[in-house]
Every structure is written in structure tokens, then in C-alpha cells.
């Protein structure tokens, strides 16, 4: 449990910059995703085979979720949010295979949250022009600092939610495996790694979608 | 009163425990949301999927304060283990 609380270990350094375990584990996730994509891409046909059926089911399900939350006009966000969801999902459930969960590191989750926050402001500026900046002084002018703090709190709460949940899950799993080493950790792992991992990745993408579609209109 | 490393560490650990009292708030909030969701499903069983998704997202938002407390408690634990090294 100590080593989970201490944060990720440094695997190697490039030009004096430390490369931590979280980054290396994210590379593993990326390689797995790329290999899966290449496997699913092979032999695309009009009459889909088994692997193409699975891929089409995934894409259709996700595009259904995106259009139901963000509206028909924003269906172009499906690839972005699909990728974000799969990346966070595989990062979360990597703990099952004995790796340190990359999302139990504040640097990784803050990076994901910053992507969302920058796209919120980008799409709001694109949709409303500079009238968007007027939203900061509404309803009253002296609420400007409070509105700015509210905007700054968004990446913090987004990243802390994912980070805290995954780190808490890892700590509890380490405590359970320390206390009982037979059978119980396997059952607990289904909840703390699998269920909470799927739920948290879904919630992260869901909140990003809601924020961006709110910013656009 | 003398303030040595052990006194500081002990109070930091106590603080970590007290910080987690914040877990009460999200528990009440999530329970309330879940109860309302169950009522909504009872009234409109055909809208079950929409209600499920909405409940999960709102519960995640309600959870935020508890997660902040957890992060602070873990920071305090890290502080103590750094102190005793």
C-alpha cells in the first residue's frame, strides 16, 4: 500500500526529464488500442463478419449516446469522445492485469481534463464569438471573480474526480489483498477495478459532452 | 509544550481521519438521488435508461466533495510518511 500512496515510480529519464510508470502504462494502453483498431479494420466488407459486427456495434452505440446528449448537429464529436472513452476505460481497468493504473496519477487525469476545458472555451468562442466573454460579467459585473473561479474549478473537479476514484480503488484493493490473499481480492476487484473503472470513464466522457454542448448553445 | 516529529505526525494522521468525515455528505446526497431515481422509475418504467444515465452523472457530481476529502487525507498520509523518513 505504501508504494501506491507514494505515487508512480520513475522508469527512466530522457535528457533529465523523468518518465514515470503512468506514462509507460499509457503507452501500453495506446499500443493495445492501435492493435485492436488494426484487427477490426482488416477485411471490411458490405456484409460484416464477426469482428466487424463488434466494431460497428461499438461505433453505433457510442454515436447514439453522443447524438442523444449533444444533439444531431454535434454528431461529429463521436470519434473524439469515443477515443477519450476507450483510452480512459482501458487505463482504468489496467489495474486488473497487475499494472499501476495510469489514471491514479493526477498528472494524467489533469491532462485529460485540460483537453476538455480547452475545447469548452474553444467551441464557446467559435459559436458565440466575443459575446461569449460577456457571459463572465452576468448577471452582475462584480460577480466576475466568482465566475472566473468557477471556470478554474472545472478542470480541478473533473480531474480530481477520476484521480480520487481510481486512487481510492487502488488503495482499497491493496488493503484487501494485504488482509486476505485468497478469493476475496478477486471478487473485490470486479467492483473496484472493473465496475468503477467503466463507470468513471463513462462519467468523465459524459460530463465532457454535457459541458461542451452547454458551451456551444 | 514540545513539538517533535511524532506530535506533528500524530496530528496530521488525526487530521486525515477528520477530513474523511466529509464522506457523510456525498453519501446522503447520493442516497437522495438514488431514492428519487427509484421513484421516477416507478412512475415511468419506460424511461428507465434515461433515468439511469442521469442518476449516474448527477451522483458523480455529488461525489466530488467526498473525493476532495479523500485527496486531502491521502496528501496528509503522504506528509506523515515523508516526515518519518
Image (cartoon, coloured by chain):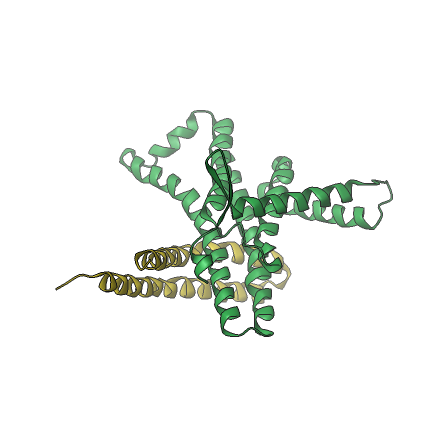
Chain colours: A green, B yellow
Q: Answer yes or no: is residue A127 visible.
A: yes
Q: Residue at x 62, y 64 (%)?
A: B45
Quarter location, residue A188: bottom right
Outermost residue, right side: A47
Name the spot of residue A49 as percent of width and height, x first: 85, 48
* A139 relative to B69, above or below: above
Left or right: A207, with A138 as reference point = right
Name the spot of residue A196 as percent of width and height, x first: 55, 59
Given residues B74 and A199, the one toward you in this image is B74
Name the spot of residue A180 as percent of width and height, x first: 53, 74
Q: Answer yes or no: is residue A217 visible.
A: no
Q: Residue at x 50, y 70 (%)?
A: A178
Given residues A114 and A209, the one toward you in this image is A114
Outermost residue, left side: B1
Given residues A123 and A18, the one toward you in this image is A18
Left or right: B23, with A181 as reference point = left
* B73 relative to A39, above or below: below
Given residues A41 and B33, the one toward you in this image is A41
Name the spot of residue A43 as percent of width and height, x first: 84, 40
Quarter location, residue A30: top right
Q: Residue at x 33, y 37 (%)?
A: A139
Q: In this figure, what is the number of numbered marks?
A: 0
Q: Residue at x 45, y 52 (%)?
A: A7
* A169 relative to A75, above or below: below
Amino acid at each position: 500500500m505504501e508504494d501506491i500512496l507514494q505515487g508512480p515510480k520513475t522508469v527512466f529519464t530522457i535528457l533529465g526529464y523523468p518518465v514515470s510508470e503512468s506514462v509507460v502504462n499509457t503507452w501500453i494502453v495506446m499500443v493495445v488500442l492501435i492493435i485492436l483498431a488494426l484487427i477490426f479494420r482488416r477485411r471490411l466488407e458490405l456484409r460484416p463478419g464477426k469482428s466487424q459486427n463488434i466494431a460497428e456495434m461499438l461505433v453505433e452505440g457510442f454515436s447514439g449516446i453522443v447524438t442523444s446528449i449533444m444533439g444531431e448537429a454535434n454528431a461529429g464529436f463521436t470519434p473524439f469522445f469515443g477515443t477519450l472513452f476507450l483510452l480512459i476505460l482501458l487505463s482504468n481497468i489496467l489495474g486488473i492485469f497487475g499494472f499501476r493504473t495510469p489514471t491514479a496519477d493526477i498528472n494524467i487525469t489533469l491532462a485529460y481534463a485540460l483537453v476538455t476545458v480547452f475545447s469548452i472555451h474553444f467551441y464557446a468562442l467559435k459559436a458565440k464569438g466575443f459575446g461569449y466573454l460577456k457571459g463572465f460579467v452576468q448577471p452582475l459585473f462584480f460577480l466576475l471573480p466568482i465566475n472566473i473561479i468557477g471556470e478554474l474549478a472545472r478542470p480541478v473537479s473533473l480531474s480530481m474526480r477520476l484521480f480520487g476514484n481510481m486512487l481510492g480503488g487502488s488503495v482499497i484493493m491493496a488493503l484487501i489483498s494485504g488482509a486476505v490473499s485468497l478469493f476475496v481480492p478477486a471478487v473485490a476487484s470486479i467492483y473496484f477495478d472493473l465496475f468503477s473503472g467503466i463507470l468513471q470513464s463513462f462519467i468523465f466522457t459524459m460530463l465532457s459532452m454535457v459541458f461542451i454542448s452547454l458551451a456551444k448553445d | 509544550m514540545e513539538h517533535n516529529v511524532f506530535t506533528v505526525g500524530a496530528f496530521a494522521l488525526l487530521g486525515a481521519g477528520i477530513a474523511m468525515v466529509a464522506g457523510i455528505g456525498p453519501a446522503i446526497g447520493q442516497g437522495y438521488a438514488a431514492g428519487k431515481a427509484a421513484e421516477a422509475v416507478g412512475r415511468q418504467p419506460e424511461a428507465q435508461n434515461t433515468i439511469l444515465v442521469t442518476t449516474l452523472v448527477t451522483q458523480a457530481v455529488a461525489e466530488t466533495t467526498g473525493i476532495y476529502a479523500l485527496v486531502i487525507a491521502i496528501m496528509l498520509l503522504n506528509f506523515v510518511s515523508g516526515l518519518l523518513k
